Image: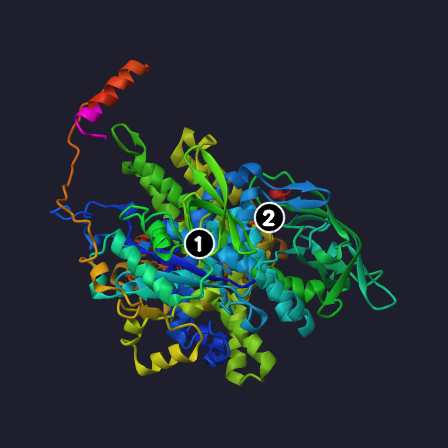
């Protein structure tokens, strides 16, 4: 059985390697100082997708990402590892979106894509850490969702069996297709880039990138299979202007504070419930937690 | 995100050597494959970009997976069950990663499923893999055996076996036997031709690296009643056909992840590779030359990790109120380690380029007649490759042992404990100067290039190269050392006693090697405008002057009449 698999992915600043220049004076992220990478859990999702493809010859894995035109970089990265192609949903009017507007926009793109069997994505992106976009897309498409997936155990006869990694153990669930599955970082790491695929797909370009090439280079892109990536606009996916970008985002950032921990004192607690309870109360009282 | 290629800028510089243009153009035959294969390069820059990108994958796998697995592999090691080898769990993981990344059959042509890489970027990958896990480099590096099938097997055999190697099946070369180690002419494993013309193997092989591989190249005695190398032929044994079992694996000092097997052949079906009687004299010699270059790369990788481990520790370890790297005794050791590493890397890639050039011409010769100029180049580069390979293998392996020793020394008492990687590096290093021909046998292979003047010719070539102002004094000094080298040869020729020549062979070969490596280092440091290589070139120059003069003195003052004193 051949499957149409969509992998949702995001290009994110590499917040795991934060250097001293990572934040600007005003507390916002200095994107120039942070390399843009493939969101780590989306790579876990890609691996699950590629395994489905391995097990079901003839399947295609398509990456779908929303972001700046340069997000085509992660589509190439996915193709180096085994994906067949990808779409960048990119448009100025999509900028400033919160999770609600983002999931609406992506859901529109999925509808435009049409015939799909399963949608995979990472549990959350390391820049926002919300874990909301995957589930919201499922809701907007009106299909089931399986979150915290660690492994797709089986896919056949119109359903999928997924192992979920939860706080206190694992749970195995069955869901009808099509559905959205979001994958955790505890799932197997993504396979490496493949040498031949890198040499082949290093030339894959989005229309924005292609426009900057010489006519000879453009001719090569057209003469070989799979090198033309897609770029979709908000209008192309028939998105309602009121529901996308800033207008479609009820989340408003009130203020961002750059918190620098200056306290040097330390506290030693005895190993008993009373002292721990006192500490917790204190932390709640001073709003450190809660 | 460790990447063992991108964190070492010297590698990319070596890859950018001006001779690469010629190598790539010969290898790609004017980039004709671009019409047929989507992964084939369009031109020189495109090909170099491909090597760079693929080496980045190698560096990533090595930094992220293979190096991280090395300690586990060393502890668990492989085992034998029911006559079959079971790799350590992490070895399986490493192999699987290499397969998925498509890093097998790198130098094989595209039509057979390979990447069609020249030897130089392939050898660079070996250098990187060895730094991550020296023992694993063997399993991965045995893909080199496919080269022998490509060169000598018939088309049908190439079609059947090489794509399997490119897909990730492993190989082994079954040469050594209990009574045939360095002396392969004594191989006894019996190949018998049946009435239907097919062959079977019977007997025992010992010390076979990765002996339970999928595809074996086997050296066996096909000519009944013969006793020397002329009765030996090369066979391909396919594990799928059965007939070979693993009796035991050795409990080794180092490279513990690489299974070293004793194999029993019982009517094992096999097929002849190439012509009868050419097994040792032609094919094994070719196979060994490739393997020796591989060990040179492995040795450079060991030197790299030894240097890095030592440097890291010396910067962190505080004694007497400062980091130990501040003390002359320690920083001298580190500078010398780095100089040996850089010098052996320069010779490694110089050798691989010569191999690339002559092999490309040999391959083209299969398709068309070479022009007289091309023929002359083929001969020249083959001679240089023949001369440089034993130097690179012999001296780099000795250097990596010295570097591993110094790495432990810098760690002090901690280095003697099992807590640091340096103790594994020390054990892994030890085999490099032994297998694929001991250093003593590399000297035997190299000495004729001392006496016939190949090394002197190379020195003459290198002396013409431009060097930076900083390194001009080293170059001037080397001219003096060349004279001492010539004087030492003259003395040996004058004595004209084979026993004396053999006795002095190691010294002469070392003198040649040291001078050549020093020339390469000053030229490469200049060409790549590299500050670190320039430092190494100065340190190495100082070292080489002392070493060459030591040998020169010894040879000049040694009376052949003293030879008897040395005999047991």
- Quickly name the residue at label 1: A179
Residue A60 makes an appearance in the image = yes
Query: Residue B452: which quarter of the image?
Result: bottom right
Residue at image point 29% right, 60% down:
A105
Query: Residue B309: which quarter of the image?
Result: top left
Q: Residues within 10 Å of mark 2 (few under 14, many from 20)?
A: few
Q: Is residue B532 left or right of residue A154?
A: left
Question: Quick one: quadrant of the C terminus of chain B?
Answer: top right
Q: Secondary structure at mark 1?
A: strand
Residue at image point 34% right, 48% down:
A124
Chain at tag 1: A
Residue at image point 20% right, 65% down:
A92
Query: Residue A8: which quarter of the image?
Result: bottom left
Percent coordinates x, y for residue B326 in the rendering: 27, 37
Chain at tag 2: B
Percent coordinates x, y for residue B420 in the rendering: 43, 35
Magenta stretch, main secondary structure class: loop
Residue B482 makes an appearance in the image = no
As measured in the structure, the alpha-carbon distance from the residue carrying label 2 to the one carrying label 1 is: 89 Å
Is A284 one of the magenta-colored residues? yes
Badge nearest the viewer, 2 or 1: 1
- Quickly name the residue at label 2: B561
Q: Which residues are magenta?
A: A283-290
């Amino acid at each position: 059985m051949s499957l149409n698999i969509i992998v949702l992915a995001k290009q994110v600043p590499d917040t795991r390697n934060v250097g001293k220049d990572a934040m600007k004076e005003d507390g916002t992220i200095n994107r120039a100082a942070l390399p843009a990478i493939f969101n780590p859990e989306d790579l876990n999702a890609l691996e699950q997708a590629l395994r489905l493809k391995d097990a079901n010859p003839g399947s295609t894995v398509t990456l779908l990402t929303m972001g700046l035109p340069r997000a085509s970089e992660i589509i190439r990265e996915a193709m180096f590892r085994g994906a067949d192609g990808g779409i960048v949903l990119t448009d100025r009017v999509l900028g400033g979106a919160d999770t609600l507007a983002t999931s609406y926009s992506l859901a529109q793109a999925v509808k435009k894509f049409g015939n799909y069997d399963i949608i995979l994505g990472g549990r959350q992106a390391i820049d926002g850490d919300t874990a909301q976009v995957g589930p919201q897309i499922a809701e907007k498409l009106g299909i089931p969702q399986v979150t915290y997936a660690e492994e797709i155990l089986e896919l056949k006869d119109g359903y999928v069996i997924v192992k979920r990694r939860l706080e206190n153990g694992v749970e195995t669930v069955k869901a009808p297709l099509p559905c959205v599955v979001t994958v955790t970082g505890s799932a197997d790491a993504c396979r490496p880039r493949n040498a031949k695929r890198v040499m082949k797909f290093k030339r894959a370009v989005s229309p924005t990138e292609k426009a900057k090439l010489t006519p000879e280079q453009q001719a090569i892109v057209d003469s070989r299979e799979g090198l033309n990536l897609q770029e979709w606009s908000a209008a192309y996916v028939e998105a309602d202007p009121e529901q996308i970008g800033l207008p479609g985002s009820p989340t408003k950032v009130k203020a961002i504070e750059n918190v620098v921990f200056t306290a040097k004192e330390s506290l030693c607690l005895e190993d008993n419930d009373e002292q721990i309870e006192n500490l917790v109360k204190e932390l709640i009282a001073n709003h450190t937690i809660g | 995100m460790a990447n063992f290629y991108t964190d070492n800028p010297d590698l990319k510089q070596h890859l950018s050597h001006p001779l690469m243009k010629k190598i790539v153009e010969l290898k790609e035959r004017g980039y004709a494959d671009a019409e047929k294969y989507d992964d084939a390069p369009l031109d020189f820059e495109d090909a170099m970009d491909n090597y760079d990108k693929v080496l980045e994958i190698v560096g990533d796998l090595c930094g992220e997976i293979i190096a991280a697995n090395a300690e586990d592999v060393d502890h668990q090691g492989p085992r034998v069950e029911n006559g079959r080898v079971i790799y350590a769990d992490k070895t399986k993981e490493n192999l699987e990663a290499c397969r998925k990344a498509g890093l097998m059959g790198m130098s094989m042509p595209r039509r057979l499923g390979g990447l069609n890489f020249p030897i130089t970027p392939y050898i660079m990958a070996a250098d990187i893999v060895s730094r991550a896990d020296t023992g694993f480099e063997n399993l991965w590096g045995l893909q080199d055996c496919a080269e022998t099938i490509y060169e000598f097997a018939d088309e049908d055999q190439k079609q059947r076996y090489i794509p399997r190697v490119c897909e990730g099946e492993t190989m082994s070369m079954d040469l050594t036997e209990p009574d045939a180690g360095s002396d392969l002419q004594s191989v006894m494993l019996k190949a018998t031709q049946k009435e239907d013309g097919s062959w079977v193997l019977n007997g025992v092989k010992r010390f076979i690296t990765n002996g339970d591989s999928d595809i074996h190249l086997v050296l066996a005695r096909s000519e009944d009643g013969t006793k020397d190398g002329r009765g030996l032929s090369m066979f391909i044994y396919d594990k799928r056909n059965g007939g070979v079992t693993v009796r035991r694996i050795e409990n080794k000092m180092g490279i513990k992840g690489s299974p070293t097997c004793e194999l029993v052949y019982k009517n094992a079906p096999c097929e002849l590779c190439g012509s009868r009687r050419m097994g040792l004299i032609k094919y094994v010699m070719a196979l060994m030359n490739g393997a020796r270059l591989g060990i040179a790369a492995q040795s450079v990788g060991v030197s790299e990790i030894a240097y890095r481990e030592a440097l890291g520790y010396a910067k962190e370890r505080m004694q007497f109120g400062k980091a130990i790297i501040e003390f002359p005794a320690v920083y001298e050791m580190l500078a010398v380690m780095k100089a040996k590493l850089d010098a052996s890397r320069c010779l490694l890639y110089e050798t691989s380029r010569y191999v690339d050039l002559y092999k490309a011409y040999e391959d083209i010769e299969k398709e068309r007649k070479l022009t007289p100029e091309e023929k002359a180049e083929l001969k020249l580069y083959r001679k240089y490759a023949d001369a440089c390979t034993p130097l690179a293998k012999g001296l780099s392996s000795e250097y990596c042992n010295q570097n591993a020793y110094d790495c432990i020394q810098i760690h002090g008492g901690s280095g003697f404990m099992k807590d640091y990687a340096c103790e594994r590096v020390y054990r892994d290093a030890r085999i490099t100067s032994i297998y694929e021909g001991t250093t003593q046998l590399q000297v035997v292979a190299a000495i004729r290039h001392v006496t016939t003047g190949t090394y002197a010719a190379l020195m003459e070539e290198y002396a013409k190269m431009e060097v930076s102002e900083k390194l001009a004094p080293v170059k001037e000094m080397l001219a003096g050392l060349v004279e001492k080298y010539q004087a030492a040869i003259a003395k040996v020729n004058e004595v004209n006693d084979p026993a004396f020549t053999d006795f002095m062979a190691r010294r002469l070969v070392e003198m040649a090697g040291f001078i050549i490596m020093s020339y390469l280092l000053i030229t490469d440091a200049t060409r790549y405008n590299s500050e670190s290589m320039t430092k190494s070139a100065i340190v190495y120059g100082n070292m080489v002057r002392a070493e060459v003069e030591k040998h020169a003195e010894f040879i000049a003052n040694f009376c052949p009449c003293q030879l008897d004193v040395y005999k047991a």
